[in-house]
Amino acid sequence: MPSWLAEPICQRFDALKVFEGTKHGAPNHCLVNEYEAGQGIMPHEDGGAYSNVVATVSLGAPIVLDLWEKSTDEEGQQKGRGRPRHRILQEERSLLITKGEAYEVLLHGISERHRDVGLKEGSGGELGDDECEQPAINWELLGDKEAFVDGVLQRKTRVSLTFRDVLKVSKMGQKLFGKR
């Protein structure tokens, strides 16, 4: 991981002991994703290539992460179905640490929608076809509740930095790029 990314962020992970107990004790991989309003990612689990801790830094706009119970379709493939079990509102410049049951038992994803409604208990309204009214389980922990008038999030472009500890690290990249 480049020092310009690792130094400011991983020092904070160390102080918080985020990756304590993982194979390498620190993240060695960072995935950068951009989500525009209306874009998402289907319910999924990260799989066995990673330690069971993920640290996600949200930049740009807030987003709602949905968590589903695992279920299987007709072909035996894992997928989330129906209404999410939980919704987490990730504010801009926030850190979400996913581990334990949230990592091991639930699927996570971002629904493809332009706005999220009903994020505050009792703040529902008329729903559009692509909307889900379910309070954010972290509503009381938010730093700026006033930014979500009536429990509504109008989505904008969001960038996520997803830090993981990859269990088996290949040396091939170092050989390809001449690093030792």
Image: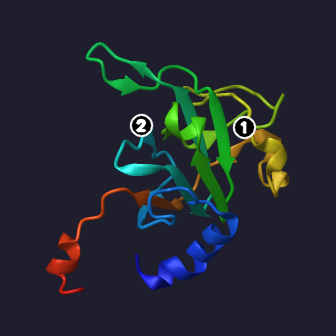
- Note whether residue 130 is visible: no
Q: Is residue 55 above or below residue 135?
A: below
Tell which of 28 and 43 is nearer to you.
Answer: 28
Residue assigned mark 1: 136
For disc 2, the neighbor class at 10 Å (few under 14, some 14 to 19, many from 20) is some
The count of marks equals 2
Q: CA distance from mark 1 to mark 2?
A: 19 Å
Q: Position of residue 129 (x, y in %)?
A: 55, 26
Location of residue 38 in the rendering, given as x and y in whole percent from the top left corner: 49, 45
On the rendered structure, is 152 left or right of 177?
right
Instruction: Name the residue nearer the viewer: 6 or 24.
Output: 24
Mark 1 Cα-neighbour bin, 10 Å: few <14, some 14–19, many ≥20: many
Q: Position of residue 89 (x, y in %)?
A: 68, 46
Q: Is residue 108 left or right of residue 11?
A: left
**Relative to 29, residue 174 above or below:** below
Q: Secondary structure at mark 2?
A: strand
Q: Residue at x 62, y 70 (%)?
A: 14
Residue type at mark 2 is Met
Identified by mark 1, the residue type is Ala
Q: Is residue 28 left or right of residue 76?
A: right
Among the two numbered marks 1 and 2 on one chain, the one whose residue lies closer to the N terminus: 2
Residue 48: which numbered mark, if any?
none
Q: Residue placed farthest to the top in the image? A: 74
Q: Position of residue 22 (x, y in %)?
A: 50, 56
Which residue bears the numbered disc 2?
42
Position of the C terminus by quadrant: bottom left
* Residue in the image at 69% along x and 35% along y: 117
Does residue 65 appear in the picture of this structure?
yes
| Quadrant including the N terminus | bottom left
